[in-house]
Amino acid sequence: MAAIRRIALDCRVDVIVTSNLLPGLAASLVGKFYDIPVIYDLVDYFPGFLRRYRVPRFLLPPLERILETIISVTAKRCRAVVTPSFSLGTLVRNRYLKSDGNLFVIPNGVDPEIFNPGKVDRNAARRKLGVSHEVIVGLVGTLEFWLDFDFVFRFLSNLRGLGITAKLMLVGSAPYGQAAVNKTINSLKTKYSLGDSDIIACGLVPHEAVPELIAGMDICLLPFNSSVVAQTSCPIKLFEYLSMGKLIVSTPITEVSRIAQDVAIMGNADVTAKQVSARLLNANDASLASVTRRNIAMRYSWSSVAEEFGNVVVRTLSQR
């Protein structure tokens, strides 16, 4: 808190934008004491992340209450609270604010110039991956507790059961438990009779390499589970997939339904596999849908997101 105070006073800042738990709390206290408006950018439901750290079950309720209290105190002291999803915004309003007066929902976004299918050679990308005619089902992102891995492997197995030669590409790692994720993957490979050759594991890659990898995919997954963290999220990968014009298959997620319900296939692994099978047979429909998806992504460029956030800053300053 001392460092935040020193920077705020020495630089004579007009507004503080903060996030996370303890930094957010410290910034809100500095803002309150020195009458500096603070904007709380609440990017995730942080109490839900306790699952990441293998906390003993009996400690979860009291620790969750502590984290809830920190968020509540911070949110009430800030002039504005920003969330990336309406579902998280609703949670914040109901639990912490009790009103919508200083609550703003600004979704995540994408750089459509970087995630641009016109700038990537799909065939070259597939050659690098060593695939030709196979249908590539891709999952990009951190392999974390909020993912439904059973959905991923059941979906792949169902596609193969429908006569589609499909492989799974995993792009990302599990920084908080790679061994456990590997164990889960191996168990599911056995459960659904899949071999090592059916999985392309790319591991952690630089973000600038992601557009080419997505270009090589035919189907992109958003397999989120029913946890609060998952259901209040606004996945950045949604916008990156859309910007690349890719067919998206998702478990039911509020923000995916709100933003991409007309172009994403949502449901369980059985229903979605059948719908995808029908889509893959219609090349004309696929081409038109690809353009539609990219048009949706263009509405969520990072420059548009930044402009929305800038408007919140201006509004906050005008209320000093």
Image (cartoon, rainbow, N blue to C red):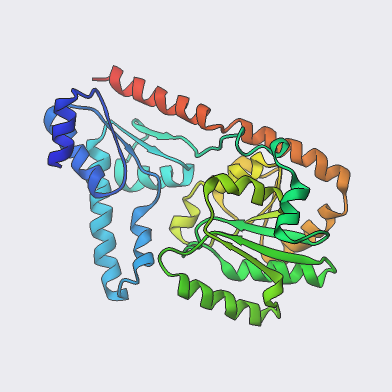
Whether residue 113 is visible here, answered yes or no, is yes
Query: Whole-percent x and y of residue 169?
Result: 65, 62
Image position, residue 69 (x, y; %): 23, 52
The answer to which quarter of the image holds residue 161 is: bottom right
Q: Residue 34: percent from the left, percent from the top?
A: 13, 28
Q: Please state if 133 lies on the left or on the right of 113 as rendered.
A: right
Residue 286 lies, with reference to residue 102, above or below; the image says below
Q: Residue at x 24, y 22 (%)?
A: 14
Res 167 quadrant in image: bottom right
Residue at horizontal 42 percent and vertical 42 percent from the top: 89
Q: Is residue 57 above or below residue 308?
A: below
Rendered image quadrant of residue 66: bottom left
Report the residue at 61% width, 34% height from top. Answer: 112
Q: Name the residue nearer the viewer: 206 or 232.
A: 206
- Where does the image place residue 268, in percent across and percent down from the top left? 66, 63
**Quarter that holds the N terminus:** top left
